[in-house]
Amino acid sequence: MSIVNQNTQVTAGSNGVETPSCYSKQSLGQLLRNNLGFLPVLFTLIIIAVFFQITTHGLFLTPRNLTQLILQITTIGTLGLGVVLVLLLGEIDLSVAAVATLCSVVMGMLSERLGYPAWIAISAAIATGAMIGFINGFFIAYLRVPSFIVTLAASISYSGLLIYLLQGQATLIINNDFIIGLANNYQTGSLVGIGLPVLVLTLYIAGTLSTNYQRRKMHLTPSSSLRMAATIGTPVLIVIAALVLFHAYLGVPQALLILASLILLCWLLLTKTPYGRHVYAVGGNTEAARRAGIHVVGIRITIFTLCSTLAAIAGILATSRASAVASQINPTLLLQAIAAAVIGGVSLFGGRGSVWSIVLGALIIGSLGNGLDLNNQPVEIKQMIEGAVLLLAVTSDALIRRAQTRTGR
């Protein structure tokens, strides 16, 4: 089956300006990949939600459970956001879970053992994450050591360092009210609880429309009406439904507002600045980016710095929610962060993906875990299913990339 699609090719006119040319045929599979984008991932999430809604006898989609689900995925989402940035370069960071735990230990020690104010402890934890990321980036970008080796070695080293810092203490209890409130407070007022989500949504819509307008202005192929409707309409419906559900319980979780703000900032950085275009260029073709005058070393160092900084914030949110710091690293946290990024649609090969994809990816990972918990399934079942979903996502990404290579895309 083929579908006629307009404006898919560009040719040079008599005035030397490139203009959209005639119709070209596109298979249904190509239309789904190029024009529907995240919709297959969204359909997967809907299927999971319907399945667990039925098997849990209506418990899955209750306001209380959905609020708990959001709180469960804020750590994965924040950690996965950093993973997305690294994957856009075609690299990998295996140290994010260890960095998150180590930075939370730094915050806990400064707050509980040394008695520093919360803002100093939190700032020190974030600064520690940034320093770690800079060191990782230096070895990877400047010394050209493979990112797999550097971050694996870092993960092992930081695992030992955090145990050394805690001096044999298995758990460090957090008593600071401000730190605990970061991930446990709710916003019910219209200014923050409603105003901030609406602001984020408005900026997203404005940015999407602006990008499409610029493509038309530059005589490039704009997004189809179907894709624009899906790209704008889906987030609007999700935000409205989420606000109704949250306010039916306790309000909008503050941790969700923090995550949404971080995603928005990273999206603006990657799509509205020359730096962001350079990131995609380096991930798409490093040698071509270098010949175009892009400072590849600097891009890589800053991305790894941002990744570990976001890992530190994820560790802070996890500590806030648990009101404690553990000396053991969550063995599935790294898998879940990478899985959320890849399932959401970020390519493992670099140069393709959006930071918004972490939302759907984290929701799928979180929904699987939450739904299986409600069905009283053991941990081993959860891990097998999450691993299978990750393998399916990576396989799909590889097949799509192969098909695009054959068609010259």
Image: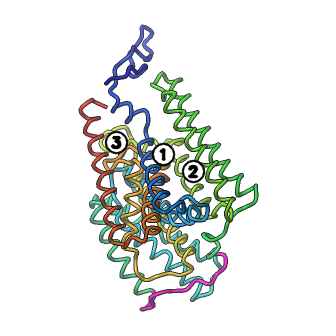
Q: Quadrant of the N terminus?
A: top left
Residue at 44% from the left image edge and 86% from the top image edge: 165
The image shows residue 38, relative to residue 54, as above or below, that is above
Residue at 42% from the left image edge and 82% from the top image edge: 162
Marks 3/1: CA distance? 14 Å
Q: Is residue 381 left or right of residue 79?
A: left
Query: Which residue, given by chain and number where applicable, does mark 2 sit on?
Result: 264
What is the three-letter code of the residue carrying label 1? Tyr
Query: Which residue, given by chain and number where applicable, does mark 1 sit on?
Result: 275
What is the three-letter code of the residue carrying label 3? Gly
Marks 3/2: CA distance? 23 Å
Question: Dots 3 and 1: beta carbons under 8 Å?
Answer: no
Q: What range is drawn magenta here? A: 166-179
Under circle 2, the secondary element is: helix
Residue lying at the far bottom of the rendered structure = 168
Residue lying at the far right of the rendered structure = 190
Q: Which is closer to the viewer, label 2 or label 1?
A: 2
Where's residue 263, x and y in %?
A: 54, 53
